[in-house]
Image: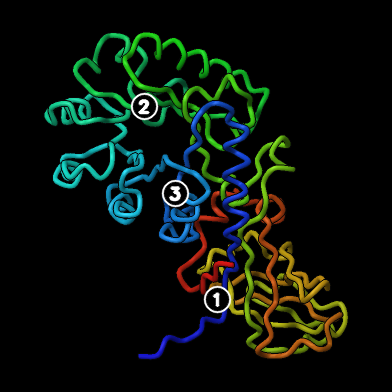
Amino acid sequence: MAILEAPLRLRLDGDALARNWRALDRLSGDAACGAAVKADGYGLGVTQVVPRLIDAGCRDFFVATWAEALEIAEMTEGLSLTVFHGVRAADMPTAKAGHARPCLNSPEQVQRWQQMGGAPCDVMVDTGMNRLGLTPEQVSGGILKGLNVHTLMSHLACSDEPSHPLNRQQREALAWIGERASAKRLSLANSAGVALGGDYAFGLTRPGLSLYGGIQVPRLENEIASVVAVEAEVIQRRTAKAGETVGYGATFRAPANTELAILHIGYADGYLRGFSGSGMAHFGEVECPVVGRVSMDLIAVSVDACPQVAEGDWIAVDYDLPTAAAQSGLSQYELLTGLGRRYQRLWI
């Protein structure tokens, strides 16, 4: 069966991905710099992301589940691969194969892993986020006795707010716990945490979002490059006459005859309704604002300034992560991981 070319595509910049990792590695100082590649490499395709990061120098990788670990087990053989969500009873047959280390998050997981007779693991300790992790009291009380802990880690709750007092509290808590637990290294900083400074790096940083072009704090603005470019094909060109409305809910009324290009992209592709009336596209250097409401598979953009646009042309849909987040009210994480399966993914 012939493979049909999709009417929407992602142009993915592998060089920018590698440069972003190198920038974060430099900002990590003497600490190793890893990479969170969960959620299919934040939506970009993990089997394409991981080899490029390995070539750039990354040696530590993090996924959420054992299924994600198996997908990249062969290409990360001999490197460090951690499963953030630990190990359920159902995961034990897979975990015993040794492709990855679990990050143990609860007393039940610790007890389960103690049956492995010294197999290495990582451990998450909760220092103030109240999500996953053992309590500091459990760790200092000796719950990890007998475990071969490779990395003892915690997770920053407010790293995108550099002045938030919880950042310092969490850093101090992890340092305190690290003095009372036997682990080869400590880890705290995510992407924004890397920008907090060397005190937060410990032995390993774990960036995710900024590898793929996300910028949450000013310090990263000159360090991180965009990786993702979205393009959609024009399905139809049409004219909305003065006074006519466009799209569901009739939220846009044409003030005069308005030329529209209808593009094959919508919220089923991760271009969510937050872009309705606020998103922007470009045909070359010409701005083409999104008009009306984003629907499941289609958007309308104004092409009054582009008389040459016709069915079959491609239009760039703005997806610079910080800018798109401001336009749509969506988080940069949502923008990345929501990219659907219908895109052609073209690495350049």
User: Which residue is disc 2 drawn over?
Assistant: 151
Image location of residue 198, percent across then percent down: 60, 22
Image location of residue 210, percent across then percent down: 59, 45
Whether pointer 2 and pointer 3 mark residues with C-beta atoms closer than 8 Å, the reply is: no
Image location of residue 101, percent across then percent down: 28, 37
User: Which residue is disc 1 drawn over?
Assistant: 297
Which quarter of the rendering shows the C terminus?
A: bottom right
Camera-side residue: 328 or 70?
70
Of mark 1 and mark 2, the one earlier in the sequence is 2
Single out the mark in the foreground, 3 or 1: 3
Give the residue displayed 51% in from the left and 36% down from the top.
33
- Residue type at mark 3 is Val
- Residue type at mark 1 is Asp
Single out the mark in the foreground, 1 or 2: 2
Please rate how many residues cluster around mark 3, counting C-alpha atoms within 10 Å: few if below 14, some from 14 to 19, many from 20.
many
Give the residue displayed 80% in from the left and 84% down from the top.
259
- Residue type at mark 2 is Thr
Is 205 drawn above or below residue 164 in the view shown? below
Cα–Cα span, label 1 and label 2:
44 Å
User: Which residue is disc 3 drawn over?
Assistant: 37
Please rate how many residues cluster around mark 1, counting C-alpha atoms within 10 Å: few if below 14, some from 14 to 19, many from 20.
some
In the rendered structure, the answer to whether residue 117 lies left or right of residue 244 reads left
Please rate how many residues cluster around mark 2, counting C-alpha atoms within 10 Å: few if below 14, some from 14 to 19, many from 20.
many
In the rendered structure, the answer to whether residue 35 lies left or right of residue 242 reads left
Of mark 2 and mark 3, the one earlier in the sequence is 3
Is 183 drawn above or below residue 100 in the view shown? above
Camera-side residue: 107 or 51?
51
In the rendered structure, the answer to whether residue 108 lies left or right of residue 82 reads left
Give the residue displayed 16% in from the left and 40% down from the top.
89
Is 330 drawn above or below residue 297 in the view shown? above
| Secondary structure under the numbered disc 2 in the rendered image | strand
